[in-house]
Amino acid sequence: MIRPSAAKARHRREALEGYLFLCPALAIIGLFYVYPALYSLYVSLFRWEVVQEAFVGLRNYAHLLHDPGFGHSMLLSLVYVAGSVPLEIAIGLGLAILLHQGLRARAFFRLLYFLPYITSQVALSLVWGWIFNAQYGVANAVLGLLHLPPQGWLLANNGASSVFQVASGGHLHLPDSLPPSLALASIMLVSVWFYVGFHTVVYLSGLSAIPTEVTEAARIDGAAGFNLFRYITFPLLTPTTYFLLIVATIGAMTSFNIVYILGGGGVQAGCGGNPLETTKVAALFIFDRFWCQTELGYASAAAFILSLVILALTVLNVRTVGRRVAFAD
Amino acid sequence: MTVAGVLMAFPFLWMALTSLKSESEATIFPPRLLPQNWLFSNYLLAWHSAPFARYFLNSGIVAVGQTVLGLFSSALAAYALARMRIPGKRIIFGILIATLMIPPEATLIPNYITIQRLHWYDTYFALIVPFGASVLSIFLLRQAFLQVPHELYEAAVLDGCSHARYLARIVLPLSRSALAVVGLLTFIRGWNDFQWPLIVTSSESVRPIQVGLSIFESDVSTQFQLLMAGTMMAVVPILILFLIAQRQLVQGISRAGLR
Amino acid sequence: MIRSRLASLGVLLLLAACGTQSNAPNSATAAPEEAVTITFWHGQSGVLGQRLQTLVDQFNSTHKIHVNASFEGSYTSGQLQQKIVAAIQAGTPPDLAQVPGPADAAQFVKANAVTPVQQFVDSPDGFTASELKDFYPAFLDDNRLVVNGKKELVSWPLSKSVSVLYYNPSLVQQAGISAPPRTWDEFRQDLLAVKQHSSAVPLEWTPDLYYFWAAYLRGNGGDILSPSLDKAAFNNDKGIAALQYEANLVLADKTAVVTKGFDWQNDFANGKVAYSVSTSVSLPYIEQAMPASGKFQIGEASLPAGSVKAGNTLFGNNLLIFNKVPQSHQRAAWLFMKWLTDTDQTVAWALASGYLPLRNSALKSATYQQKVAADPRLSVPLAAVSSGAEGVQASPDWNKLQPILNDMVVAALAGRKTPQKAISDASDQVNSTLSGY
């Protein structure tokens, strides 16, 4: 019969065309992401310091699982993600909605929120280091104005929970060793500050994709304010939220620059920034093992385990949030 | 709004004011907000400390290159994944998502080796090509392309339109907002990148600004006021770009309404 | 220019050959320079980078060899090491590079990526034993490693500095102190005196590097690793006493404040701090950070001495030649290194960078003597070098041990662990790291 074979030929042509379309992107991603991942996996199976030595199979992985430093750094990374990502996304959404409603000087505010994201993280992290300086930083000055005791901020290994304790006048009591420490919490705050603009912009793009007829129709039906948001806007934004959640989680798990500059002792402290015990997130651990202690095999194994954890988190995101997403297709 | 605005802007404001201070003022205690003398000369000093004109040019070439290449490859791939029937689409999806989870540390050395083997070390190719495709861009654009109603495609097919033509003539113009966002984000990433350019370049003729700014830090101290001045200068082109792209975003919004 | 250099080299060699030194270079005269282009990766950014480049340009204009020097990332924060390690992986290392210290050199030696400079020192292009004596022994020792059972020079010094004690003369005088402390006990008393007599912070520094602890330890005859570099050697009275001293200052006496990075510099420059401990190179930077209205002459003194000597650790950086590059490049790299540390150049680099001159002849040169006469503080670090500064022990695993030692100090100073516990924990960790896989 002619019809089915014609359809099949058309499908084959479409498939070929499809592959052609995918070629440039897949070639680059294949060469610069997939190949390195496989290479890294290969390296992780060897005792590999500066040069390749003996094949050790899974021994690097076994060592890592027993390495308290690694476990601790993974825990800190998870705390970092849990503390900063939801906050970033929520604030980003809030700002996007406010901006979308057509305020005066909207363009100005849009620019303002986006400024941190587009400026060099190195320079701004140094500024934040200032703000949080225990001796002469603005943060302690503000605390002084509020008649609160100065904190060590980025040097403070004591738990952030102690701040709540102080703020509540000593009534709220949480264990001091509970992560995050004040230092890590300060860094998380800076991280949120940096990335809120990104979420705002992406949400704005998502908001603009909602056809106005939909919101108009809802308004005519009497929905307004929070109800409009809850039943119309937010559900239609779930693909964006879903996307941002995944991207932000991955970004926070591998976050390096900010933690490196703020979490450490600064340049004078030597290779790897010499971070405090309570700010040694996974990315810093891996950097240290790669370049300071130069154990490429061990570090590659650590990186692979980090990837697996990120995968697990992503799957978690897909399973929980993903179910509620209203996809266009 | 204003509270949020102030909180967002304060460090930036501090950075701007510090760039106008003298060296000792920049690190004085207790910190003063305003400089005693507004040393606009710091900017001149910073500019002349290194071949910043060249660095700007390099950053521009690299960022533009990444954006153009990125939009090209990502749009094609996004469209293919959105609208075309391709066997093994799920597998490709899976691989793409998987690459998102690879920590950058793991890819640094192999990519360096690849660059050396391709003889791209210390060239613009090394700076542009590895970032010429991004899974994030592909996914963002795919989402946007999916918003273009399928009926339009069916109508186009009846008119004898090929995928390529449909993409170029219909889908892309309707997705301006998303393209602007992706382009802007790619440009920013390329402009602000520090680690990779440091690794794959040696000569001043190819170095971008972010690496050039490290001239204000040495192993014994940091010249904060000059570093801030340099950073401010580096932000200006992106600000301009953002202001231009904002119009695209707004147009995108109104277009969605007109439909 | 080149001819006169060869001539003087020839004369030196002739004189050397006539001597009875046991490691005189081969009687053959040095071959003439070949015109090659070599790559030199360094980690000097900023002003120091520019001054280094000036020297490089000077070399290029007077020699057939052309050196392409480039800043490849800061060497104190690991960026330069990153590039070198990546380059070794790719098989494309530079011809020579700057490395922080013997520990990094040891790593690369262990990875079989380095050509020890000893062979060049022993060659006609090198030095006689008497010429070698012109260099401060501590600086050369800092570059010696055991390779194939023999201790030899693997890298070559470029920039060297030591820790010094900075003080604010007026604050110190106010407390009734007339001279810098000579022993650690005196220092402790001085700090208490400052606390009594003023509201200034007696000691403020960033001690999360273990150097302060090591200075006390070594000053009392202790050491960090055993001579065979395979065991920790500080889990004893000496190690604990050294850590207890620091902890006392911070926790008991409350005369010392811990800061992050360079923060102490700002406070010191603003006249709020009486003493600080840091590398001798910091001086001009602290001076730069002083406000216009509050400038003062910073005092500089050697670190206090222990019962054996004034312990101190050498900082700075050295130069390495990689072995995967052509022989002609290696030789050219050596000739460049040699030139760079010739008397005139080491004086120039010392004055430009604040690092120390590497040889006696440099110290005795008119230019340097003039500077010393104008600013006697310049002689303080050199005195420290002669009286007991040593490099870190060159174990290839040193970079793994450093964080352990840092954490040990931080934990003790924060009061989280007693010095005994901190020392014993660190010692266990060091031993398990050294015993390897």
Image (cartoon, rainbow, N blue to C red):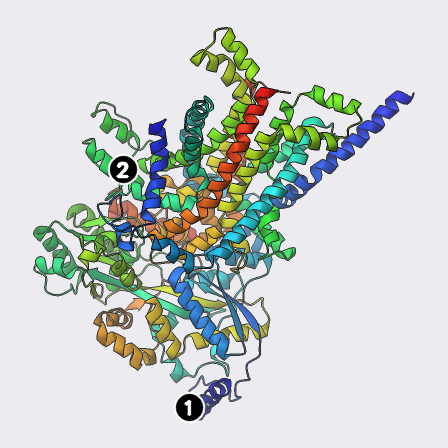
In front of the other: label 2 or label 1?
2
Q: Residue A139, which numbered label?
A: 2
Same chain shared by disc 2 and disc 1: no
Three-letter amino acid code of the residue under disc 2: Ala
Which residue is nearer to you in this view: C224 or A21? A21
User: Which residue is painted at 55% across and 33% down in the image?
Assistant: B181
Farthest residue in the right direction?
A1
Chain letter, disc 1 residue = C
Chain letter, disc 2 residue = A
Which residue is nearer to you in this view: C53 or C5? C53
Three-letter amino acid code of the residue under disc 1: Thr
Q: Position of residue B252 (x, y in %)?
A: 57, 27
Farthest residue in the top direction?
A221
Read off the residue under disc 1. C20
User: Secondary structure under badge 1?
Assistant: loop
Q: Position of residue C162 (x, y in %)?
A: 30, 65
Residue A256 seen in the current view: yes
User: Which quadrant of the view contains residue C323?
Assistant: bottom right
Which residue is nearer to you in this view: C321 or C170? C170
Left or right placement of residue B72 versus residue A74 in this view: right
